[in-house]
Image: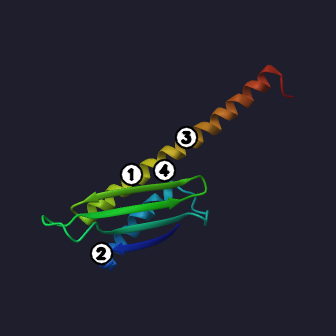
Amino acid sequence: MHIDIKATNMDLTDAIREYVQSKMDALDKFVDGADTSVHAAVDVGLTTKHHHNGEVFYAEVNLHTALSDFYATAEEEDLYAAIDKVQDIVSRELRSSKKKHTDLTRRGARAIKRLFRRGEIE
């Protein structure tokens, strides 16, 4: 999976880059590892610079796979919490998509099996 990481209104440190990389690498189990077209664009940063009561961080992920595109965003008071939350959202969407694809394949296989049993296909 190719990952582009961008920071908005803040500096992108090596620690943040490695943390985002490790969280996105955890999503590899849901996507085909041999597929080179899988691309993730991650944007982390401060929402604005005008907050008076502390900073509000956000994390945003655009994940493009062969099956479909996934998008998630999260806002938290801690940057690492926002990254964790957005990773949970994307993994939930990927898991759901994978289950739907598997169910559709099995349903089609059952329909073909029924046709063979009835003798409509030889």
Compute the Cα span from label 2 to label 3.
Answer: 38 Å
Residue 94 bears which disc, if any? 4
Q: Residue furthest top?
A: 118
Q: Residue 29 at what x, y percent from top left?
A: 50, 56
Compute the Cα span from label 1 to label 2.
Answer: 24 Å
Compute the Cα span from label 2 to label 4.
Answer: 29 Å
The first of marks 3 and 4 along the sequence is: 4
Can you identify the residue that label 3 sits on?
100
Vertical relation: 109 (above or below) 10: above
* Helix, strand or loop for disc 3: helix
Asked if the residues shown at circle 4 and circle 1 are in contact, with their CB atoms under 8 angstroms apart, the answer is no
Image quarter hosting the C terminus: top right
Residue 77 bears which disc, if any? none
Is 62 displayed left or right of 104 in the figure? left
Rendering quarter of residue 53: bottom left
- The local crowd at label 1, few if under 14, some if 14 to 19, many if 20 or more residues have their Cα within 10 Å, is some
Q: Foreground mark, 2 or 4? A: 2
Is 1 displayed left or right of 117 in the figure? left
Compute the Cα span from label 4 to label 1.
Answer: 9 Å
Residue 9 bears which disc, if any? 2
Q: Of residues 45 and 66, which is closer to you in this image?
A: 45
Rendering quarter of residue 74: bottom left
Can you identify the residue that label 1 sits on?
89
